[in-house]
Image (cartoon, grey):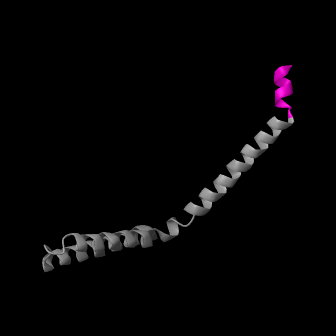
Amino acid sequence: MKLRKFVFNKGTRFAILMALFYQIFMLGIYYYGYHAIPSNFIALVALLIGLYIVYFNRSISKQKTDTDMDKISEAVEVAIASGATAATE
């Protein structure tokens, strides 16, 4: 009988209602936040590569040569081209 009183108590019903509301609210936040990732993935890859190049240029600016920069630019072009083809498939 005590379990029945606990289950049908106003506080228990309110707690279950709040838990359901919280789950729906958090699902909405996560869905809204992750919904934009697939359509903007190429821009994210290009941004990360660009940030890496800036960091790379600053960290070894005294040691870099023209051939190093040519290799980096080729790698960026290949990464962007492969990302663009992967997104369209």
Quadrant in which the C terminus appears? bottom left
Q: Residue at x 33, y 74 (%)?
A: 50
Quarter of the image where one finds residue 44? bottom left
Residue 86: percent from left, percent from top:
40, 67
Q: Main secondary structure of the magenta part?
A: helix
Quadrant in which the N terminus appears? top right
Query: Closest to the observer: 85 or 63?
Result: 63
Relative horizontal placement of residue 38, taking residue 79 as reference (left or right): right
Magenta residues (range): 1-9
Quarter of the image where one finds residue 83? bottom left
Residue 17: percent from left, percent from top:
78, 44
Residue 59: percent from left, percent from top:
22, 69
Q: Is residue 89 among the parts visible in the rendering?
A: no
Q: Is residue 20 among the parts visible in the rendering?
A: yes
Q: Residue at x 51, y 65 (%)?
A: 37
User: Is-magenta flag for residue 3?
Assistant: yes
Q: Residue at x 39, y 69 (%)?
A: 45
User: Taking 5 as reference, is 10 above or below it?
Assistant: below
Relative horizontal placement of residue 24, taking residue 30 as reference (left or right): right
Q: How many marks?
A: 0
